[in-house]
Amino acid sequence: MQSEAVWRCMADLAMDSREFDAEALKSRLAGRRMGWRIHYLPVVDSTNRLALKLVREGAAEGTVVFADCQTSGRGRLQRVWQSPPGRNLYASFLLRPAIAPAEAARITLMAGVAVAEMISIFCPAGVGLKWPNDVCIQGRKVCGILTEMKTTGRALDGIVVGIGLNVNITGEDFDPVFRKTATSLREETGRIFPREEVAVLLCDSFEKWYRIFLGEGFAPVREKWLSRSGMTGRRVRVLFQGEAQEGVVVGIDDDGALLLEDELGAVRRIIAGDASIVKG
Ligand code: BTN
């Protein structure tokens, strides 16, 4: 028993320092709708920036950009996404859905549902969604999603859905600012994950939910998102550009805006910001 544990530990250590196996990933994803074409870079400034360039150059839907490390990973609201090498997944999915630019937030929520469902395989309890784009485990952020798009006039040329998923990063590797609020699959399970496996599962789940979205519309996505968010009926505060808005969450609308009801029963649409549950 003891030697088995030692071997497992050695395998974990080997996996921990292992490079991302892009060739293995390519062959696993061959023939799929999401990931049929892969661009892998050991280092890139931002997979989203590169994917947007590919949109402009005419790359097809289902192309996915992966990187081992990002030097200027982009977060929401002009923030930086911590992107060390050898630890996590940084992926940007290129889509060309026939929707209006104003509907792009639906895709962000769809991606959140896809990620949450995928990581629930490893963490059956405690996976939740936080508006607008965070996937959390036991309330700590494990994944962020940044959707960017290219438009011509009122038409949408393409959307890039960037997903940063904390896989094997450990507590001490996190920027001190995020240590209390961020987590990883490894932190939650005590296991080290082969990132290619997680990437294949991510592409599968993304493809499943994108098909649902295209075939059945936003309703099933919204329903699943709300059932996983746990925000409905809770009092939240949303901070945006120095202003705070407070109210009880009554849902999300067709454009992915958060619906907050105030004391007088008026419902406001919130389109951007950082939401937190008001305790007490
Ligand atoms: C957030 O602020 O929560 C969104 C973070 C999104 C990070 C991902 S990592 C892959 C992709 N490339 C980027 O530059 N950003 C996204």
Image (cartoon, rainbow, N blue to C red):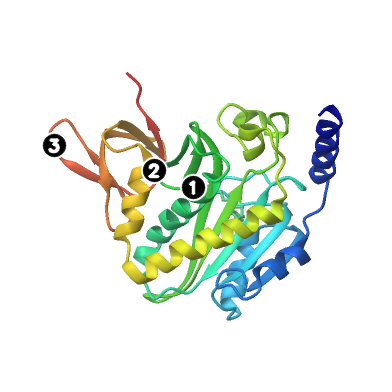
Name the side, left or right, on which 16 lies relative to 56: right
Q: Earlier in the sequence, mark 1 or mark 2?
A: 1
Quarter residue 122 falls in: top right
Real-space Cα separation, disc 3 to disc 1, in angstroms: 32 Å
- Binning the other alpha carbons within 10 Å of mark 2 as few (below 14), some (14 to 19) or many (20 upward) gives many
Residue contact at pointers 1 and 2, CB within 8 angstroms: yes
Front one among 1 and 243: 1
Return the residue found at the far left: 264
Name the side, left or right, on which 162 lies relative to 44: left
Q: Which mark is residue 228?
A: 2
The residue indicated by pointer 3 is 265
Real-space Cα separation, disc 3 to disc 2, in angstroms: 25 Å
Return the residue found at the far bottom: 58
Q: Is residue 23 visible?
A: yes
- Binning the other alpha carbons within 10 Å of mark 3 as few (below 14), some (14 to 19) or many (20 upward) gives few
Q: Amino acid at mark 2?
A: Arg
Give the answer, above or below, for where 143 lies relative to 62.
above
Which residue is found at the position 47% from the left and 56% from the top? 111
